[in-house]
C-alpha cells in the first residue's frame, strides 16, 4: 500500500539550510535571501516556549495511540479530517496518519470533545494556544519579509493571515516507525514530494529526521531535526505574490525504521475570496506578471483535483513566460 522509493540518496544533513535568529537585529535581508534562494528556512529565538509545543504534541500522541477504530469513529462526528495512510482525495498514499483541523477557536473546541474524551479542555487549550502563537510568528516573519522587499504597508502580507476569514489549516502528522523495512535498502515514503499550495507553512517536529527539501539543482537534502525551532516553507501562492522572486520548495518526508515522527504544521492561507496576483509594487519597474489572476478559492479547488506531486501552479502561468523551476 505504501510506496517505496529508490535507495536513499545518502543525503547528508544540509548544514547550510538558512537559519534566521529573530533576536538578531535586522533579519529582513537574510529572510528575503532565504525565500529567494531556497524557499525554506529555520527560525530560532522566536519566543514560543518549548513547553507549549510539547503540550500539544503530547495530546496528539495520546490521540494517535488510540485503537484505529476509535480514531476513525471520532473523526466521523467532528469537523476535523482524520486520515490513515491516505493523503488527499485522489489516491496518494504514505506511511502517515494525520489530523487536519480548521483553526477557528469554536471549531477547535468542538473538535476537542472527539479527540480527547477524558480531557477535552486540555487539548482545546493546548491547540488554541499553539495555533495562536504560530500564527503570530508567521505574521511577524511576513512583516519582516515585507520590510525586506521594501513594500508598504508593512502588513500587506500578514493581513491575509490575520483576516477573520483566512482559510488557514492546521495539520498534525504522525509517522509511525516501520521496523519491518529496516533490512531493506529502500526508504519508505511518509509523505510524498509536493509543494504547499498556501502562502507560507510553519512546521515544527519532534526530534526526528525525515523531512527533506529539493534544492534548485534537483538534489534532495535532509533537514536536521530541531524540536525547539520552526521551519518555514514558501508555498505556491507566495511565489505568485512575489512574481516568482520567492521560490516555493518541493519537500517530502521519509519514514524512519526506528523513531516515530510527529510534526505540526500551520498552513497560512488567504481568505477564499482573495484575488491572487503579484503585488503591484513589485511590478512597478515594468516587469510583467508571470501568472494569470485567480482567487484562492479557485486555486484550492483546482489543487484538490490534483495528485500530490503535480505542479499545481503550471496551469496558472501566462503563456510564453518561463516560470519554473530548476
Ligand atoms: C499539501 C499541503 C497540506 O498538507 C494540505 C494537503 C492536501 C491534503 O492532504 O488534503 C492536499 C495537498 C496539500 C496538495 C494537493 C491536494 C490537497 C492533498 C492533495 C492531493 C492540507 C494542502 O492544503 O494541500
Image (cartoon, rainbow, N blue to C red):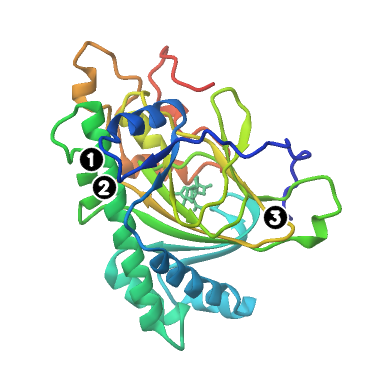
Reading the image, the residue beneath label 2 is 139
Asked if residue 88 lies left or right of residue 255, the reply is: left
**Residue at 35%, 31% in the rendered image:** 30
Asked if residue 261 lies left or right of residue 263, the reply is: right
Q: Are marks 1 and 3 in contact (CB under 8 Å)?
A: no
Asked if residue 309 lies left or right of residue 162, the reply is: right
The percent coordinates of residue 19 (x first, y second) are: 43, 39
Q: Are marks 2 and 3 in contact (CB under 8 Å)?
A: no
**Residue at 50%, 44% in the rendered image:** 305
Q: Is residue 274 visible?
A: no
- Determine the residue located farthest toward the bottom in the rendered image: 118
Near mark 3 (Cα within 10 A), the count class, few <14, some 14-19 or many ≥20, is: many
Q: Could you tell me which secondary element the residue under label 2 belongs to?
A: helix
**Image quarter in which the N terminus is found:** bottom right
**Residue at 54%, 24% in the rendered image:** 216
Residue 143 circle label: 1
Q: Nearer the viewer, residue 155 or 243?
A: 155
- Determine the residue located farthest toward the right in the rendered image: 183
Q: Could you tell me which secondary element the residue under label 1 belongs to?
A: helix
Q: Is mark 1 within 8 Å of ligand 1?
A: no
Q: Nearer the viewer, residue 324 or 174?
A: 174
Against 126, is 84 above or below?
Answer: above
Residue 256 circle label: 3
Distance from Cα at disc 2 to Cα at disc 1:
6 Å
Against 17, is 114 above or below?
Answer: below
Q: Could you tell me which secondary element the residue under label 3 belongs to?
A: loop
Amino acid at each position: 500500500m505504501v510506496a517505496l522509493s529508490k535507495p536513499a540518496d545518502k543525503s547528508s544533513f544540509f548544514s547550510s539550510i538558512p537559519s534566521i535568529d529573530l533576536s538578531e537585529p535586522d533579519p529582513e535581508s537574510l529572510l528575503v535571501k532565504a525565500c529567494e534562494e531556497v524557499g525554506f528556512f529555520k527560525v530560532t529565538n522566536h519566543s514560543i516556549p518549548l513547553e507549549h509545543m510539547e503540550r500539544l504534541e503530547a495530546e496528539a500522541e495520546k490521540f494517535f495511540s488510540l485503537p484505529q477504530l476509535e480514531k476513525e469513529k471520532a473523526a466521523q462526528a467532528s469537523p476535523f479530517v482524520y486520515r490513515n495512510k491516505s493523503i488527499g482525495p485522489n489516491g496518494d498514499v504514505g506511511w502517515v496518519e494525520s489530523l487536519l483541523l480548521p483553526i477557528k477557536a469554536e471549531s477547535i473546541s468542538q473538535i476537542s470533545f472527539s479527540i480527547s474524551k477524558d480531557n477535552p479542555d486540555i487539548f482545546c487549550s493546548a491547540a488554541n494556544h499553539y495555533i495562536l502563537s504560530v500564527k503570530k510568528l508567521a505574521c511577524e516573519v511576513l512583516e519582516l519579509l515585507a520590510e525586506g522587499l521594501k513594500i508598504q504597508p508593512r502588513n500587506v502580507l500578514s493581513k491575509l493571515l490575520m483576516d477573520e476569514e483566512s482559510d488557514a489549516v492546521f495539520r498534525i502528522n504522525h509517522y509511525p516507525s516501520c521496523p519491518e523495512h529496516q533490512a531493506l535498502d529502500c526508504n519508505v515514503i511518509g509523505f510524498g514530494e509536493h509543494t504547499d499550495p498556501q502562502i507560507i507553512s510553519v512546521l515544527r517536529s519532534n526530534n526526528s529526521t525525515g523531512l527533506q527539501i529539493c534544492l534548485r539543482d534537483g538534489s534532495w537534502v535532509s533537514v536536521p531535526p530541531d524540536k525547539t525551532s520552526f521551519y518555514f516553507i514558501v508555498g505556491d501562492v507566495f511565489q505568485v505574490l512575489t512574481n516568482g522572486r520567492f521560490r516555493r520548495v518541493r519537500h517530502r518526508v521519509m519514514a524512519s525504521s526506528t523513531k516515530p515522527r510527529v510534526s505540526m504544521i500551520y498552513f497560512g492561507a488567504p481568505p477564499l475570496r482573495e484575488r491572487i496576483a503579484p503585488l503591484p509594487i513589485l511590478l512597478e519597474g515594468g516587469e510583467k506578471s508571470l501568472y494569470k489572476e485567480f482567487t484562492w478559492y479557485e486555486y484550492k479547488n483546482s489543487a484538490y483535483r490534483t495528485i500530490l506531486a503535480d505542479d499545481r501552479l503550471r496551469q496558472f502561468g501566462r503563456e510564453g513566460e518561463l516560470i519554473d523551476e530548476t
